[in-house]
Image (cartoon, helix red, strand yellow):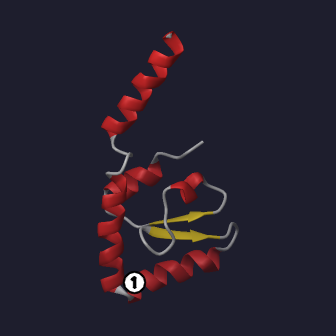
Amino acid sequence: GFGMVIPQLLGCGMPVIVTTNTAGEDIIENGYNGFIVPIRDPDAIADKITYLYENRPELEKMKVNAEATSKMGFTWDDYGRRYVENLENLIA
């Protein structure tokens, strides 16, 4: 499944760090709106957090990109439309 927390965080303007074991790769563009790191690699996560802390201009860009991404098919309205479409397809 796809954790809704990823688009929810993007909607709050938060760059997201995900592992390759999530569906995050479907929405996260590495270095654009977050980072994709290997599983079971806490050092990789720490490196990305440190990078954002030490590179505030890049963090600000990624925050804008994160929020923009959330508006590209991941709003609650988008979810509702897809849900209704699925129900209509089941009925048909």
Which residue is situated farthest in the top direction here?
91
Q: Residue at x 54, y 55 (%)?
A: 26
Where is residue 8 shown, x and y percent of the image? 38, 50
Residue 67: give x, y in percent of width and height: 31, 60
Q: Mark 1, residues whose alpha carbon is within 10 Å: few (<14), some, or many (≥20)?
A: few
Residue 65 vs 27, above or below: the answer is below
Q: Please, which residue is most extreme toward the right here? A: 40
Residue linked to disc 1 = 53
Screen quadrant of the N terminus = top right
Which residue shows up at 67% across the image and 70% down it? 38
Near-viewer residue (43 or 11): 11
* Residue at the image point whose x is 38% and y is 46% from the top: 74
How far from the left and from the top, in percent, is residue 88? 45, 16
- Image position of 74 (left or right of 22): left
> Given the current orientation, which residue lies at the most extreme front position?
92
- Seen in the picture, residue 7 relative to 84 is either above or below; the reply is below
Between residue 52 and residue 76, name the one nearer to us. Answer: 76
Q: Give the amino acid type for the residue marked by disc 1 in the picture.
A: Tyr
